């Protein structure tokens, strides 16, 4: 049977950054992102994602070790391509490190990493991460030039930025939605053909997730802000369960 008829199970990684954002807004220790990580594990999530930013606006350095100690779930550390973040990743040795673009003034990650333009900067970082046994992922646009750069860098995983798709969906622009879906689908197939595992994330919600889930080569979704927002109204556990149900309806 073909992969299209029987796609692999789809993993759900939950980004817990914004639990820490709420904590940091007032100071102190509540709400604790470690408790969020434990809830993800209890509900059956497949991984924890955390972005340690230069300005430490949400996850803090000490959170990383606490998260790793609190659950057996693999930690996916989102990080900028800097020597500071490389040193932190090598010290903590997360399961995976996803290299993302980062600008201090941005509210959230704006678009994918320019892996092609930053090739020379990325080579030593990717090599050192891989040498330490950390699975490297590149957060990129679903673009053949960027995918080719990931292949040349030896990254085993790419995570496609789904922000444009999410914006088109919110705008009700069906033509744009279909165009973005085709772009992501085509690049996911090309990634798989070249031995690269494809993930997806950014802006995914209960309403728009299923068309992305239907792309058979996508192996993992990383979703954070939306789930933490929903948790304000229904609780984190029900929010994650609902997302998992929607994914399972398709895959």
Image (cartoon, rainbow, N blue to C red):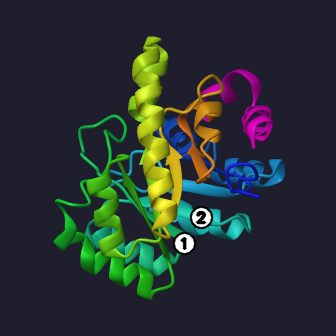
Q: Which residues are magenta?
A: 228-251
Find numbered disc 2 in the image and state the secondary structure of the residue it sits on: strand
The residue at the far front in this view is 1
Instruction: Judge whether residue 234 is colored magenta.
Output: yes
Label 1 to label 2: alpha-carbon separation: 5 Å
Q: Position of residue 238 (x, y in %)?
A: 80, 32
Find numbered disc 1 in the image and state the secondary structure of the residue it sits on: loop
The residue at the far bottom in this view is 131
Left or right of 47? Residue 116 is left
Residue pictured at 37% horizontal, 76% vertical: 154
Q: Give the main secondary structure, helix, strand or loop, of the magenta stretch.
A: helix
Instruction: Judge whether residue 205 is colored magenta.
Output: no
The quarter in which the N terminus is drawn is: bottom right
Report the number of discs: 2
Mark 1 vs mark 2: which is more N-terminal? Answer: 2
Residue pictured at 31% horizontal, 38% vertical: 110
The answer to which image quadrant residue 100 occupies is bottom left
Please indicate, yes or no, whether residue 77 appears anywhere in the rendered image: no
Q: Position of residue 173 (x, y in %)?
A: 43, 14
Please indicate, yes or no, whether residue 238 appears anywhere in the rendered image: yes
Residue underneath mark 1: 94
Residue underneath mark 2: 75
């Amino acid at each position: 049977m073909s992969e299209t008829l029987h796609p692999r199970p789809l993993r759900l990684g939950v980004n817990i950054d914004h639990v820490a954002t709420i904590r940091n807004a007032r100071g102190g220790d509540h709400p604790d992102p470690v408790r969020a990580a434990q809830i993800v594990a209890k509900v059956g999530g497949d991984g924890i994602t955390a972005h340690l930013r230069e300005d430490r606006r949400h996850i803090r350095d000490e959170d990383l070790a606490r998260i790793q100690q609190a659950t057996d779930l693999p930690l996916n550390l989102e990080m900028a391509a800097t020597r500071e973040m490389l040193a932190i990743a090598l010290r903590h040795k997360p399961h995976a490190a996803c290299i993302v673009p980062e600008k201090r003034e941005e509210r959230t990650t704006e678009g994918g990493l320019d892996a092609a333009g930053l090739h020379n900067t990325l080579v030593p970082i990717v090599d050192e991460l891989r040498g330490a046994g950390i699975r490297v992922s590149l957060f990129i646009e679903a673009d053949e030039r960027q995918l080719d750069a990931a292949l040349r860098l030896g990254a085993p995983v790419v995570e496609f930025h789904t922000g444009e798709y999410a914006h088109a969906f919110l705008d009700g622009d069906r033509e744009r939605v279909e165009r973005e879906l085709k772009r992501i689908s085509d690049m996911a197939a090309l990634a798989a053909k070249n031995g690269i595992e494809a993930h997806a994330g950014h802006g995914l919600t209960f309403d728009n997730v299923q068309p992305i889930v239907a792309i058979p080569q996508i192996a993992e979704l990383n979703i954070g802000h939306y789930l933490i927002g929903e948790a304000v109204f229904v609780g984190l556990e029900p929010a994650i369960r609902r997302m998992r149900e929607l994914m399972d309806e398709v895959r």
